[in-house]
Amino acid sequence: QSVLTQPPSVSAASGQKVTISCSGGNSNIGNYYVSWYQHLPGTAPKLLIFENNKRPSGIPDRFSGSKSDTSATLGITGLQTGDEADYYCGTWDSRLSAGVFGGGTRLTVL
Amino acid sequence: QVQLQQWGAGLLKPSETLSLTCAVYGGSFSGYSWSWIRQPPGKGLEWIGEISHSGVTRYSPSLKSRVTISQDTSKKQFSLKLDSVTAADTANFYCARGSGSYANWYIDLWGRGTLVTVSA
């Protein structure tokens, strides 16, 4: 049971937009920055978003992040088949004194 | 370009000790935290623990009693030891570079992963 809750799966048509939610509490999202990761099968995870809404160099602006209170959201616009992957949110948890990840959301592009 | 190269035994018997090492190439070792993260087959990412550039370690509460993370700054390497493994520890283990800040915690660089299988 992950500390951060994500939907197991989401889907949307190619070219459309999708959002992935990440719900936590005051000991984690409520007081810490959120990051997002893309994990394609057979590869290492990749950082997509840090500090709630910042993109590392090389990440297209189709990917965006936001945070409100104890929840965060990853948005992906202009969906492509190459975006099919597992997406994870992450943050620090002060109660556990540990890094924590959401359970992951599998994105299917129809 | 900074790269993480990891190695270690991929097949263990129950009760043995898992040992993995990760080397940092092409970049600085200081100023970051160095983490281990695992992914059991068909499951999500699980943070194991990290060591800061100053040597402070933090571990997942669920693994704390069995985990040791250490570093050799002269070699720009860090290591993971997990004692008394069972089949439940079978996973793909990643070494990773962290931001070095708890207030702004994130992982910005990952190794390629090592599949560790525990089987009698």
Image (tube, helix red, strand yellow):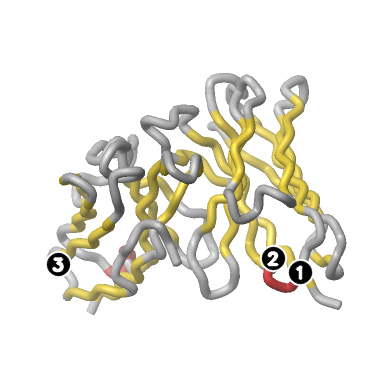
Q: Position of residue A97 (x, y in %)?
A: 49, 40
Residue A26: image x %, image y %? Answer: 29, 44
Please, what is the three-letter code of the amino acid marked with disc 2?
Answer: Asp
Q: Is residue B81 above or below residue B1?
A: below
Checking the image for residue A15, the label placed there is 3
- Give the residue pinned by disc 1: B86
User: Which numbered dot is residue A109?
Assistant: none
Q: Amino acid at mark 1?
A: Thr
Residue B115: give x, y in percent of width and height.
69, 63
Amino acid under disc 3: Gly
Secondary element under disc 3, as helix, strand or loop, is loop
Q: CA distance from mark 3 to mark 2?
A: 40 Å
2 and 1 marks in contact (CB < 8 Å): yes
Q: Dot 2 lies on which element?
A: helix
Q: Is residue B98 found left or right of B69 in the rendered image?
A: left
Give residue A32's quadrant in the image: top left
**Which one is in front in this view, the residue at disc 3 or the one at disc 2?**
2
Mark 1 is surrounded, within 10 Å at the Cα level, by few (under 14), some (14 to 19) or many (20 or more) other residues, namely some
Identify the residue shown where x is 76% and y is 52%. Answer: B82
Which disc is residue B89 wearing?
2
Chain for numbered disc 1: B
Q: Residues within 10 Å of mark 2 (few under 14, many from 20)?
A: some
> Are labels 1 and 3 on one chain?
no
Q: Give the spatial CA distance, label 1 vs label 3.
A: 45 Å
Q: Is residue A17 above or below residue B57?
A: below
User: Residue extending furthest front?
Assistant: A95
Q: Kindly identify the residue that appears in the image at 66 percent across and 24 percent down.
A: B55
Q: Relative to residue B60, is residue A9 depicted above or below? A: below
Left or right position of B14 against A36: right
Locate the C terminus of chain B by quadrant: bottom right
Residue beneath the point at 39% across and 64% down: A104
Q: What secondary structure is found at the residue carrying circle 1?
A: loop
